[in-house]
Image (cartoon, helix red, strand yellow):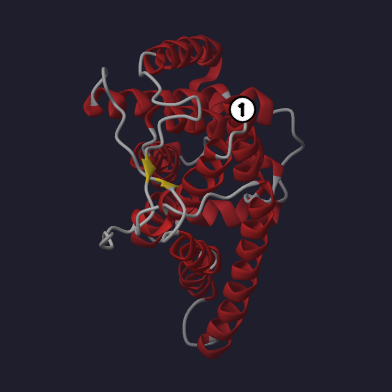
Amino acid sequence: MARRGNYNFYGNYSWYVPGVADMFILLALLLAGALLGGIITSVFTLFLSGSIAQEEMMEYAMFISYPLMFIPPMIYASVKSRGNSFNHRGFLVDNKHFSPLGAGLCALLVIIMTVSAGLASEPLTDLLPPMPDWLENTLGSLTTGRLWINFLMVSIFAPFFEEWLCRGMVLRGLLCRGMKPAWAIAVSALFFAVIHMNPWQAIPAFILGCLFGYVYYKTGSLKLTMLMHFTNNTVALVIGQIDSLAEYETWTDLLGGKYWLWFAVAIIILLLGILAFRRIPLTSPKGNCDEVPPLIGE
């Protein structure tokens, strides 16, 4: 049978369906990428030391090193997928199961649900001790530095790379290998939390990861979860760029005594949104990730 070509980016990974063991391999490769990024950052800062301000130098260094983290797992997944593509079935990374809601309504719902989830997760993060100054300064630099660098880093790179890894690879793999959906969503959300490497980000990341995972399970759409990730990160970026809001570190600070009213509204919005997505029928108990045949027929 003639080989069927595949020229889209997501299609390069359709035949790699990671299991639990592969999840740890991807994590190890991500850490290797972080090490590579750290080495390149050190070289970068060494050569530019004294020529530009330290703060500016670190911004450029992070801009270069962050995407490099994902290069090793992306190469590995692509090679594995290509090797499996000739005689194994695969599952599309990005799907379009939006009916009966429609793509536009799904997009609007996930934007509202994402903001609501971020607001509703705050009581859990409030239980943590104060964030260390070095971490607070590092995270603050991602929302208060050069807008174009921050926008690319926070609103473009992070949604693209992290959603590819956590939903497109880990969650899709666990679902399509037969793990119960609730467990697969929870495990992928935990993976999402772990790669943030600190509890102050990990707790909201886990909550958001569960929401992103449910939307992916029902729609199979990686673009939709990227939109959710973009929304969450861009809200933080916009708040960080507005001088009048700079003094507010949390939703509680911003909303004051009205926070718990908005918390209740957020919970209601999340419940209504989940009920709306429940209307999308599943093509398989594994979720709405469409199966693709081998490139050479079985």
**Helix, strand or loop at mark 1:** loop
Left or right: 124 in relation to 274: right
Work out which residue is located at the far right of the displayed protein and give it. Answer: 129
Q: Identify residue for label 1.
A: 180
Front residue of 17 and 147: 17
Front residue of 233 and 147: 233
The correct choice, above or below, for 124 with respect to 273 in the image is below
The correct choice, above or below, for 174 with respect to 251 in the image is below
Looking at the figure, which quarter contains the N terminus?
bottom left
The correct choice, above or below, for 29 with respect to 248 in the image is below
Front residue of 263 and 1: 1
- Does residue 242 show up? no
Q: Looking at the picture, how far across and down is residue 128, in whole percent? A: 74, 34
Q: Residues within 10 Å of mark 1 (few under 14, many from 20)?
A: few
- Does residue 278 show up? yes
Residue at image coords 64%, 44%: 191
The correct choice, above or below, for 45 with respect to 172 in the image is below
Q: Looking at the picture, how far across and down is residue 150, in whole percent? A: 41, 57
Count of numbered circles in the view: 1
Residue at image coords 34%, 58%: 295
Residue at image coords 52%, 38%: 176
Left or right: 139 in relation to 219: right
Quadrant in the rendering for residue 94 = top left
Quadrant in the rendering for residue 28 = bottom right
Residue at image coords 28%, 63%: 3
Q: Looking at the picture, how far across and down is residue 167, in whole percent? A: 49, 42
Q: Looking at the picture, how far across and down is residue 125, in whole percent? A: 67, 31
The kind of residue on which mark 1 rests is: Lys
